[in-house]
Image (cartoon, grey):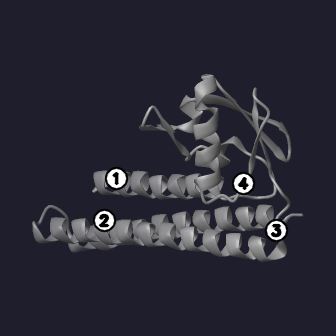
Amino acid sequence: MESIFTDAKKRMEKAITNLEKEFSRLRTGRASASLVDGIQVSYYNTPTPLNQLASISIPDARTIAIQPWDRSSFENIEKAIMQSDLGLNPVNDGKIIRINIPALTEERRKELVKIAKKHTEDAKIAIRNIRRDANEELKKQKNDKTISEDDMHRGQEKIQKLTDEFVDKAEKTLTEKEKEIMEI
């Protein structure tokens, strides 16, 4: 029975970690290296993550500086940034590609909050699915007579407490992100 809890807890932690990763990709008013992490650049006709082609730094709160290691990749990096759904315009000075992060409009902030809420809802659904899997495993063990009915009910209560704890974590993460997005 303990292995069911351990497995459920690990999987729920992964759901929260995944949610935080999704949130790091959401654009707020501040510059962040994680904003361009998911960008794939065509490098010698091979899709390559941007962070493998260049050093990415944040010189100030509204600027991302990208310094490619190979001069021939400048054009492809610029193209990949413009084609990403981030809506950013890179400026190339021959040595460094700079991306200025514009201030977000009220409308865009509300859109980002909606997206954040959708990611949170997906995480909560994943957590509930993990709860369902764990409860089914407990029922299976009861039917196989490896645990008693009382143990199964205690196990289900423990799983429910775990589920509530992780749903609360997801909600708190959303609240923090919402505050960050709406901050001017």
177 vs 151, nearest the viewer: 177
- Residue type at tag 4: Leu
Q: Is residue 73 above or below residue 175?
A: above
Q: Say which label, 4 or 2, has the lower sequence index.
A: 4
Closest to the camera, between mark 2 and mark 3, is 3
Residue 183 figure quarter? bottom right
56 vs 18, nearest the viewer: 56
Q: Residue at x 71, y 68 (%)?
A: 175
Q: Quadrant of the C terminus?
A: bottom right
Mark 4, Cα crowd under 10 Å, few <14 / some 14-19 / many 20+, is some
Q: Say which label, 4 or 3, has the lower sequence index.
A: 4
- Residue type at tag 1: Asp
Q: Say which label, 1 or 4, has the lower sequence index.
A: 1
131 vs 14, nearest the viewer: 14
Q: CA distance from mark 4 to mark 3?
A: 19 Å
Q: CA distance from mark 1 to mark 4?
A: 41 Å
Q: Say which label, 2 or 3, has the lower sequence index.
A: 2
Q: Quadrant of the N terminus?
A: bottom left
Mark 2 touching mark 1, by CB under 8 A?
A: yes
Mark 4 touching mark 2, by CB under 8 A?
A: no
For disc 1, the marked residue is 7
In the rendering, which numbered label is found on residue 182?
3
